[in-house]
Amino acid sequence: MSRTPQAQALYDRLLPEAIAASKAAWCPHSDFPVGAALLTADDQIIRGCNVENASYGLTNCAERSALFSAIAQGHKPGSFKAILVYAPKVALISPCGACRQVMHELMLAHCPVYCVGHQESASRDWTIEQLLPGAFRF
Ligand code: THU
């Protein structure tokens, strides 16, 4: 994946945070840990991980955990600079539809979403708009 130097610097900063976040995942049902690292306007990094439940539908993905945590801490929708999602048990992670909808509402259209699995050379960079064109909103 070829990136601008600025994009590569963001990626390099967020990846170790997302790896650390994935180690906190609560995923006894899927055994599929995921970590996310979200960069705020004031350059803080907020981590998220998937949190599963025996009632499967209650599971929260890593991306939504990071965003909901950031909003709860007072960071404003539309203020985030980037998010990186990391999943060690797949070659390349792709955010689920629910997370795409939530990211679309809380992050700006041009924001980068870096997706990384265990095969780092297969990583993919998206923007919010690319992940969910024509999103529902009102
Ligand atoms: N999961 C995430 O946390 N993020 C994604 O982008 C895809 C899926 C979680 C949900 C569930 O805990 C596990 O991965 C398997 O689906």
Image (spheres, rainbow, N blue to C red):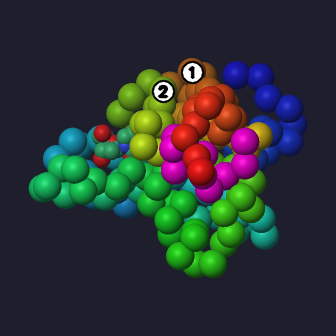
- Mark 2 — residue? 92
Residue 8, image x and y in percent? 78, 38
Q: Residue at x 58, y 69 (%)?
A: 70
Q: Is residue 67 left or right of residue 29?
A: right
Cα distance between the residues tagged 2 and 1: 6 Å
As drawn, 96 above or below 67: above
Mark 2 Cβ and ligand 1 under 8 Å apart: no
Residue 47 horizontal side relative to residue 82, left or right:
left
Q: Which residues are magenta?
A: 100-109
Quadrant the N terminus occupies: top right
Q: Are marks 2 and 1 in contact (CB under 8 Å)?
A: yes
- Visible in this render: residue 22? no
For mark 2, give the secondary structure.
Answer: loop
User: Does the closest atom of ligand 1 sit within 8 Å of the Cβ of label 1?
Assistant: no
- 78, above or below 34, in the image: below
Residue drawn at x 53%, y 76% as measured from the top left: 72
Question: Under tag 1, what secondary structure?
Answer: helix
Crowdedness near tag 2: few (<14), some (14–19) or many (≥20) residues, C-alpha within 10 Å = some
Q: Position of residue 138 (x, y in %)?
A: 59, 51
Is 36 situated left or right of 43 in this image? left
- Ligand 1 is located in which of the four quadrants? top left
Residue at image position (86%, 42%) is 6
Using the image, determine if residue 3 lies above or below residue 8: above
* Main SS class of the magenta portion in the image: helix
Name the residue carrying label 1: 122
User: How many numbered discs?
Assistant: 2
**Residue 107 part of the magenta-drawn span:** yes
To which quarter of the image does residue 78 belong?
bottom right
In the drawing, what numbered circle is on residue 13? Answer: none
